[in-house]
Image (tube, rainbow, N blue to C red):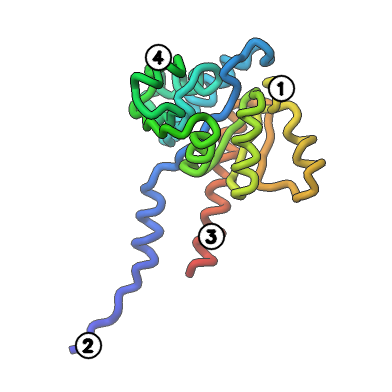
Amino acid sequence: MLRKKKNNNADIESHAHRLKYKICVSGAAETGFCSEGSHENAEIIGREIAKQGLVLVTGATIGMPYWAAKGAKAEGGLVIGLSPAASKIAHVKTYRLPTDYHDLIIYTGFNYAGRNLLLTRSADAIITVCGRIGTLNEFTIGFEDQKPMGVLEGSGGMADHIREIVENSHKGPGKVVYSNDPAELVKKVVALIEAEEKKDYKVSL
């Protein structure tokens, strides 16, 4: 007796939607030059990520990513950090980075530049808050990889120059959304991820 071949597309799609999106918050570790209220806005972003049942990914560092982690944990969210150090001892003693507000820290041993690549590629989207040259590095990696990205404008630093940088790069707008409202930005980024996922899913059928 011949059995009808089962179509697994529905099962695949259902499984895909059970996976939690991973959102990387990229931003300044040293925040003295960031806009007033940027710490609070980073924390709101972390809270919104957790409220939507998403996973926050950070560089396991101080500053804006740390405040986002604090916000996510305040809402019971899951936070994963990727450290530039090769061990917990090096993370704390050599790099002088924190371990609190994270559920898991992966010690990459690739210093900052290598860590940045792993960090951005491990995430489904990247949100930029304030930032210096390292944040710009994470943004350009994500841009080249065509990741969905969000930029919190008005937070100071590189975040307030990214729109101009993208326009002057002559490589198109990328998959970048902008907002000066942290909660709205998270919603825009999630909508962008979902739109891209649906597009890719249709192509794969």
Gap between marks 3 and 2 measured at Cα: 33 Å
Q: Position of residue 156 (x, y in %)?
A: 70, 20
Horizontal side of 55 relative to 42 (left or right) equals left
Question: Which residue corresponds to the image point at 73% horizontal and 26% vertical from the top-left?
Answer: 160
Residue 31: % across, % down: 61, 14
User: Looking at the image, is mark 3 or mark 4 earlier in the sequence?
Assistant: 4
Q: Earlier in the sequence, mark 4 or mark 1?
A: 4
| Residue wearing tag 4 | 93
Q: Secondary structure at mark 4?
A: helix
- Residue at image position (77%, 37%) is 165
Determine crowd level at label 4: few under 14, some 14-19, many 20+ residues with C-alpha closer than 10 A. Answer: few
Q: Name the residue that disc number 2 marks.
A: 2
Question: Between marks 3 and 1, how big is the CA–CA gap?
Answer: 32 Å
Q: Residue at x 45, y 42 (%)?
A: 21
Q: Earlier in the sequence, mark 4 or mark 2?
A: 2
**Camera-nearest label, 3 or 2:** 3
Seen from the viewer's position, the closer of residues 29 and 22 is: 29
Q: Residue at 50%, 28% (x, y): give it.
A: 48
